[in-house]
Image (cartoon, rainbow, N blue to C red):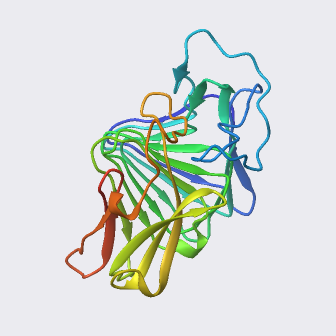
Amino acid sequence: MNGTITVEAGGALTIDAGDGTFTLTGPSLRTDIDATDELGNATPTATATCTPSATPTSKIAVKALVTQESSLFFKGRNIVTDSVVTCKDIVVPVIEIEGAADIAEGVTLGGSGILSLESGGYLSIEGAVQSGEQIDFADGTGRISIVNPAAFLATLRFTPVASARVDFPGIQAQSVGVDPSSMGRVLKLYAGPNQTAGILAQINVQTIDESSLFPTRPPHVPVLTGSDFGLSSDRKGARSLPTYPKAELT
């Protein structure tokens, strides 16, 4: 799809791919966001080939904007969000969520795009999300609900501001930890205290710069650890995690 989708306050939009594929994509000139993990190690992504601009810019060509008090629903089989990175120093989220968005059960979100949560935006995921996708807590105020963590292969990315929230409905975790992984860092929820009794869920996580949305790494920013996340219980007894720093997990 070319152009920009904007869901205005008070409105609701459903994108139904049916048995096919609906694609949100950006300019033809594109690169991968980064070719290294938080520790500077190479990752299996393409190498950027473009000339950096004189003034780094972010979010210049959002393909879908969900404003506050509005809703966007994805249904059908396949939704693809291709990267909207026009050069090595310009990062553009494909979908910016300030209101609410929902990825329904049975939907697979794939590609290499960024979904950005801002101004208290909320994202509910009942379907599957592939590993190339990235979900950013751009200003630390967003909230995401992951109903099926086993089908969530994307990376959650956190800025060092405020405290976001990640909900895991139906999971009753007693402790959390963060370990190195091939994707950088992985957040793990354990059934018992002190990281015991088995892993209930594991999610790839990463820190990013709040201005550029590019990944950060030592020595500028410490790597994520278990102490950056905290468990809390909702009224139903489910567990959630706050995000970095001190993100809340429910």
Asked whether the viewer can see residue 242, the reply is: no
Tell which of 239 and 217 is nearer to you. 217
Is 222 positioned to the left or the right of 26 in the image? left
Q: Give the percent coordinates (x, y) of residue 215.
A: 54, 40
Asked whether the viewer can see residue 119, the reply is: yes
Q: Quadrant of the N terminus?
A: top right
Give the residue drawn at x 55%, y 11%.
55
* Above or below 59: residue 193: below
Q: How many marks?
A: 0
Residue at the bottom extreme?
197
Give the residue drawn at x 55%, y 17%.
56
Where on the picture, by quarter, is residue 242? bottom left
Tell which of 70 and 211 is nearer to you. 211
Give the residue drawn at x 68%, y 64%.
77
Give the residue drawn at x 64%, y 12%.
53
Q: Give the percent coordinates (x, y) of residue 93.
A: 55, 36
Where on the picture, by quarter, is residue 4? top right
Q: Give the percent coordinates (x, y) of residue 181.
A: 61, 63
Q: Quadrant of the C terminus?
A: bottom left
Residue at the left extreme?
235
* Above or below 243: residue 40: above
Is 159 positioned to the left or the right of 208 in the image? left
Q: Give the percent coordinates (x, y) of residue 92.
A: 57, 31
* Above or below 86: residue 105: below
Tell which of 37 and 81 is nearer to you. 37
Is 137 positioned to the left or the right of 182 in the image? left
